[in-house]
Amino acid sequence: MELRALINFAIWKDFRDIKAEDQWPTTHYNRESMKKCWEYLDLTSRSFARVIMELEGDLARTVCIFYLVLRALDTVEDDMTIPNSTKLPLLKSLHEKLYEPGWTFHESKEKDKIVLEGFNNIQYEFSELKPEYQAVIADICKKMGHGMADFAALATPEQPVAEVNSIADYDLYCHYVAGLVGEGLSGLFSASGKEREFIKDQLTLSNSMGLLLQKTNIYRDIHEDVIEGRGFWPKAIWSKYGFNSMKELIDPARETEALWASSDMVLDALRHATDALDYMTLLKCQSVFNFVAIPAVMAIATLERTFMNPRIFRENVKIRKGETVRLILRATNPRDVAYIFREYARKIHAKVKIEDPNLLKLSIACGKIDQWAEHHYPSFINISTPSSGGRAASAIDPDSTDARATLFIKLAKDAQEKAQREKSEKFMADLRARGVIKTRTPAEEAEIKAKYDEMEKEGAPWLMIGGVIFGVLALMMGLGGGVVWIIMKMYPNVS
């Protein structure tokens, strides 16, 4: 299946070429500063660049600038060679640099420092965006910068990332670095007109979208983070299993306890899944939906692949490329995305060990995803798309063993019969109104009924019926005799 998906993807997938001349009016690839911004995106976003480029119209360019501005913030936060005396004020004021032509920063040693050194290009392209886009980007940059500064102020060279103690701290940190991204994107989607106005107000759902992706990455990257001296897993989780520091999680001798802590991390990430599904049902633009759905299905697949997998404490575990492509091809509508979530939730549930302290909670979390999918998109309803195109049609699967299918079929039959009756009554009423059928008065109806009752009492109907039957039999006998007489006349020698 994955090999087939890879071949189909390679042959049939039609990517948007931002370099093409017919795309220049929206991508501005012909402008030197924007061309550099597209190059910065390729260098810093890795696989995320492709889904940004697939956005329709000028939304791709806008999200590209949004991403680069936030990447600049993230680079400042991650760089431990920048002293806090420089870092904290810069994080809090970077949103102001968006309005300072020519501003750059050359003191970073981080791998993505190019976004700071070439910030003048980003700033210029930001100034070319629509005012409504600029307002969203600057607001999110300001909020994120202040949030990052709060956490960076607690960090030291010995402990590059401030220790996250409680789940509330963990949620707050993820909100600053990812939830705000979700809020900003919702604002840009609304400002572009490609999504409805109310999308920008869905702050809880937008935040949950960001947290699902961020928490998946934090969970998966445990080995790399610990090796590099970072630690994002909240102390409230790993301390429950007897660990005194994050470094102890990758100790092979304590693998069992580390797996229980990892299951707790997955449990925490799964609580954002149904919010993410709710958010995706609100989207109407196909390219925006793909942009949101593809990372979401990758996240749930990654959680399943890494769940109860001790390899995450030794290396970075990723889903297979063929599986990635298959998910991209499947994640095209809310129903299929819901089924993907349900599929991986069931796989996670199947992996839960009976001795896992989170057994019951994980079962409930996976059950909620399953329940959400069945509630919104019942599996006993078949969806089909005509081969010639047109609107999709839905029908109840007659072979389904689901008890709801029988009920729905009965309800559909009753509704059909009711509609037929109403149609007939309306037709007869129309004939009466036009005088085609005479409408009897109640007195006439009573007189006819009285005559019928009298005839029935006297047995007249039965006599009439008997006479008819006798007459028919007599006629048949007469016809039979006539046929015999004719044959005898025509063939007199027949004995």
Image (tube, grey):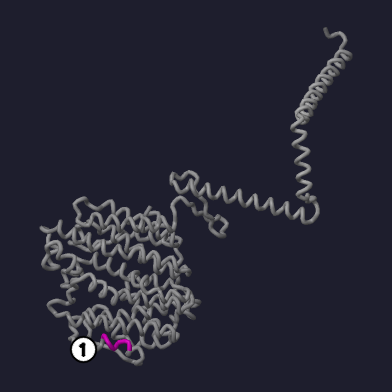
Above or below 439: residue 219: below
Name the residue located 29 percent from the left edge and 70 percent from the top edge: 214
Q: Is residue 6 visible?
A: no
**Between 475 and 366, which is closer to the camera in this rendering?**
475
- State left or right for residue 427 relative to residue 306: right
Residue 326 placed where, x, y %?
38, 58
Is residue 181 on the magenta stretch?
no
Residue 319 placed where, x, y %?
30, 60
Query: What is the span of residues highlighted in magenta in the rendered image?
Result: 91-95
Q: Is residue 395 visible?
A: yes
Name the residue located 78 percent from the left edge and 51 percent from the top edge: 439
Above or below 67: residue 312: above
For disc 1, the marked residue is 86
Residue 387 placed where, x, y %?
55, 55
**Between 346 and 306, which is closer to the camera in this rendering?**
346
User: The residue under label 1 is which amino acid type?
Assistant: Thr
Residue 109 placed where, x, y %?
21, 82
- State left or right for residue 80 relative to residue 103: left
